[in-house]
């Protein structure tokens, strides 16, 4: 469908809230909380990692001791009532591979062997907690209250362009018979449309892919060959293309690059920074 990024930004719901449990800060959505779905997008608040990974670094591919990362996962699990041994992490490659999980997969990527490359998970099993890692990239949280199935995906610009959010909704439809018009969707924090600077040609490819001319704004002066893309608009359009009503979608309105007190940012810091994580689990 074609649309206006500006109109979408003005009409979508923003319902995020920063929760602090035992000093560990997590962004939650009011809508998903009302549905009683265990979920969150972590901040850098509450972990044990020293600078520049301070402090709740949950990244598994950075130059930080594994014992600190595992300590941080344990702290998160303790603060939010998650079972550490059931935390299950994607091994992202900025692709669109989505795996279907059951309780038998619980723990993979953290306390057990990792998966092959994948950027998303679906399940209808409360015995597994889905997790993805992020450091400017957004997250798609999906919940279908009718079939009680969930999906979680990591989406940087490559995943957005490959429509991993749309594919996640389609996978819930295929595996569990979920109807996208029933689904509740949340788009996680990411680098915002003022900060996500790219080459002009890439921005134009986004406008074409999502049939949305104002998905980017042009740079000027020294930045005349650059453009600024709204990953959030790309997320909303693909969810709506999957059949999720705009009224069922919420956005966590934060910019990971600007809000350095709350978030790690790859664009801001390079490789010497930590990662946030998203988590999603059905209530038992
Ligand atoms: Zn920003």
Image (spheres, grey):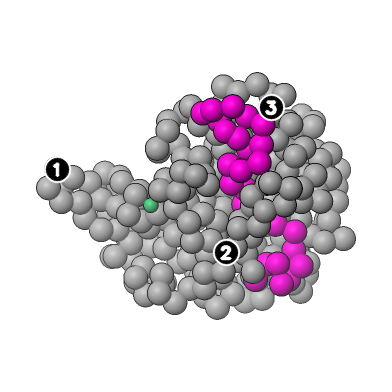
From the image, which quarter does the N terminus lie in? bottom left
The residue that label 1 is drawn on is 222
> Which residue does the numbered mark 2 point to in the structure image?
16
Tell me if I can see residue 9 in this picture: yes
Examine the rendered structure and indicate whether residue 27 appears above or below residue 225: below
**Are the residues tagged 2 and 1 within 8 Å (C-beta)?**
no
Q: Which residues are magenta?
A: 31-56
Q: Is residue 68 above or below residue 278?
A: above
Magenta stretch: helix, strand or loop mostly: loop
**Place of residue 44 in the rendered image (x, y in percent of width and height, measured from the top left):** 58, 42
Q: Quadrant of residue 124?
A: bottom right
Q: Is residue 221 left or right of residue 2?
A: left
Seen in the image, is 256 located left or right of residue 195? right
- For label 3, the residue is 68
- Camera-side residue of 253 and 283: 253
Q: Gap in Å between the C-alphas at discs 2 and 3?
A: 28 Å
């Amino acid at each position: 469908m074609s649309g206006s990024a500006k109109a979408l930004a003005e009409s979508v719901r923003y319902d995020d809230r920063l929760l602090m449990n035992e000093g560990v800060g997590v962004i939650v959505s009011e809508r998903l909380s009302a549905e009683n779905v265990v979920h969150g997008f972590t901040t850098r608040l509450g972990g044990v990692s020293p600078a520049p990974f301070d402090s709740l670094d949950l990244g598994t591919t950075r130059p930080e001791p594994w014992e600190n990362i595992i300590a941080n996962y344990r702290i998160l699990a303790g603060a939010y009532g998650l079972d550490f041994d059931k935390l299950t992490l994607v091994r992202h490659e900025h692709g669109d591979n989505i795996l279907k999980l059951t309780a038998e997969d619980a723990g993979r990527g953290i306390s057990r062997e990792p998966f092959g490359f994948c950027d998303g998970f679906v399940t209808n099993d409360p015995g597994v907690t889905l997790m993805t890692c992020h450091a400017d990239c957004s997250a798609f949280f999906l919940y279908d209250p009718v079939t009680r199935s969930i999906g979680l995906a990591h989406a940087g610009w490559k995943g957005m362009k490959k429509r991993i959010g749309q594919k996640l909704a389609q996978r819930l439809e295929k595996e569990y018979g979920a109807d996208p018009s029933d689904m509740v969707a949340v788009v996680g924090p990411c680098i915002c449309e003022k900060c996500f600077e790219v080459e002009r040609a890439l921005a134009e490819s986004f406008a074409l892919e999502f049939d949305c001319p104002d998905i980017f704004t042009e740079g000027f002066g020294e930045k005349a060959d650059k453009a600024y893309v709204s990953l959030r608009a790309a997320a909303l359009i693909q969810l709506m293309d999957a059949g999720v009503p705009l009224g069922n979608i919420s956005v966590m309105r934060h910019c990971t690059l600007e809000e350095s007190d709350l978030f790690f940012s790859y664009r801001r810091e390079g490789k010497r920074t930590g990662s946030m994580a998203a988590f999603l689990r059905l209530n038992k």
